[in-house]
Amino acid sequence: MASHRHNVGDLLRPVFAALLVIWLSGVAMVEAIAPLTIKGNKFFNSETGDQFYIKGVAYQLRARMDPLVDKDQCALDAALMKELGVNTIRVYQTDPHGNHDDCMKIFADAGIYLFVDLANYETGINEDNPYWSQTQLSSFAATLDAFARYDNAVGFWIGNEVITKVAGARAVYFIAAAVADIKTHIKDKDYGKPVYIGYASTDNADTRPFVQNYLACDHPGFAGRAASIDFYGVNAYEWCNPYDTFETSGYQRLTGYLSTAQYDIPAFFSEDGCNTNPPRLFEDMYAVYGPNMSDWWSGSIVYEWINEANKYGLVTYGMVEDPSTAIGGDPYERAGTPTPMSPDFENLKTVWASVDSLTTNIAMTAYTPTNTQVDCPASEGAWTIDPAQTDLPTLGDIATSIQATSSTGLYPPSAPSSSSSSSSSSSSSSSSSSSSLSSSSSSSLSASSASSSSSFRSTSSSTSSNTIQVSSSISIITTGSTASASHSFSSYTVVTEAPSSTEPADSDTAAPAASSTTTSKAKNAASSTKASAWHLAIVMIISTIVCMY
């Protein structure tokens, strides 16, 4: 009988060995990186409890192209980024339908986290004609679903430099509405890990402190930051001269906005690295990570990885031999082996390697936040946004033109058409030259990724529910099934009317149904790490049984 058992073991041993290889291969694919978590105004490693300071680069190799689907290119870039000292990248435009598993694992293995923009040229909120539609929500949600499951995906930008002038201030209502609805989507999906939403602000003194606080304050009718951002970024290009200091560069003023407000969420430079006086020395990093700023700022993302016409690049892929054959006549190669740009690459590498001794690190367990959520900013000067606003716009709402006054500083826009672009404005080339997918890709997004339901604040056929109190200086059109119902509130009017050609298409049927495979992956991804741990345990048990035979 013993001999018989031995023979069975001999027969089964190759089978178990093959199973062992298969299971271990699956375990090897698990990301070896811990998600970041937010506590107070700081980032922490969720496993070690160490405080996390961002050392990032903006990573967008070509306009309207997803840089996270080419594993070979990601491997080349991640290796050099690791040498530079990068621990974070910001990616402006991605394809939610692409396969990002390989690139996300490559960056995770290199210890690199990601912040991903949700908007593109076609779906971004426009400060001149702001509106919030089902098409926008579906697009944002599709990108979120594609990346939120990865442990190294930290946060998502709801907008980039949407408000660039006082006249565009009313767009802040629609940004907050987008935050509220995308957070509802996050709650409904339950990704199994923290997923954070932020906003990247233009460095405009007239609007910056107000936008900073409005998007982080507690809006009436919402609890638990349900309509408030979780982190805040500033695209800052103020330290431009070799002789600049914390006081003369404007960094002291930027830090003052946070300290005065006792800002209670993480803030960092979402773009940084002025190049008006080359070469770039990156000496501002000594301030960013030093004692003057590190209590309020969590690091910086340097603009940008690839060198192109704007001359902000840290690396180059060379020049096209024959520009006449290049895409759009672009003379810059945008793939291949990255070569450091001298001396900028080495300058940043040296500075980043030396700032660790400057940062004030605190363990998450030893940190007790004392700052409370900021108050909504009062109307002041050119900032006319009403902090007592009780209703944020809902899906289908459009800000329409009205008579501009000296007190509002608003100029009457034209209502958006189905062909008009809704991209957010940006003074940097990140959103003008390298930050958007094609409109065809955008239009193919599934509306069911975030379909209108009771979870969302969508317009209904009820006249009373379409009452949108926005401001004494603007009007709102709510597109619903109820026609010509007008509700007056002192000096402003809210009009509810049937859908018309002046509003961008936002029908639930405008896009094909979502792939059940994609939905299943999003639901199951959260438990992949735990499942893999069980897999390993099972493998060990099987191996033990094999050895017994």
Image (cartoon, rainbow, N blue to C red):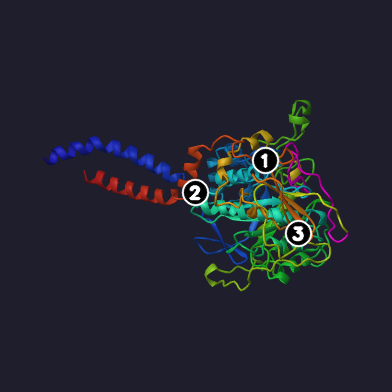
The local secondary structure at tag 2 comes to loop
Tell me the CA gap for discs 1 and 2.
25 Å
Tell me the CA gap for discs 3 and 1.
50 Å
Q: Position of residue 304 (x, y in %)?
A: 72, 47
Examine the residues drawn in magenta and state their main secondary structure.
loop
Is 262 situated above or below 230? below
Which dot, 3 or 1, sits closer to the camera? Answer: 3
Specify whether residue 8 is painted magenta. Answer: no
The picture quadrant where one finds residue 52 is bottom right
The boundaries of the magenta stretch are 406-430
Identify the amino acid type marked 1.
Answer: Pro
User: Is residue 435 at least partly visible in the picture?
Assistant: yes
Any mark on residue 31, and which? 2
Identify the amino acid type marked 2.
Answer: Glu
Q: Position of residue 217 (x, y in %)?
A: 67, 64
Is 509 situated above or below 124? above
* Between 311 and 213, the one nearer to me in the picture: 213
- Classify mark 1: residues with Cα within 10 Å, few (<14), some (14-19) or many (20+): many
User: Is residue 343 at least partly visible in the picture?
Assistant: no
Q: The N terminus lies in which quarter of the figure?
A: top left
In the picture of the structure, the residue carrying the numbered disc 1 is 338
Q: Position of residue 19 (x, y in %)?
A: 33, 39
Tell me the CA gap for discs 2 and 3.
47 Å
| Disc on the earlier residue, 2 or 3 | 2
* Between 237 and 171, the one nearer to me in the picture: 171
The local secondary structure at tag 1 comes to loop
Which residue sits at x=77%, y=67%?
252
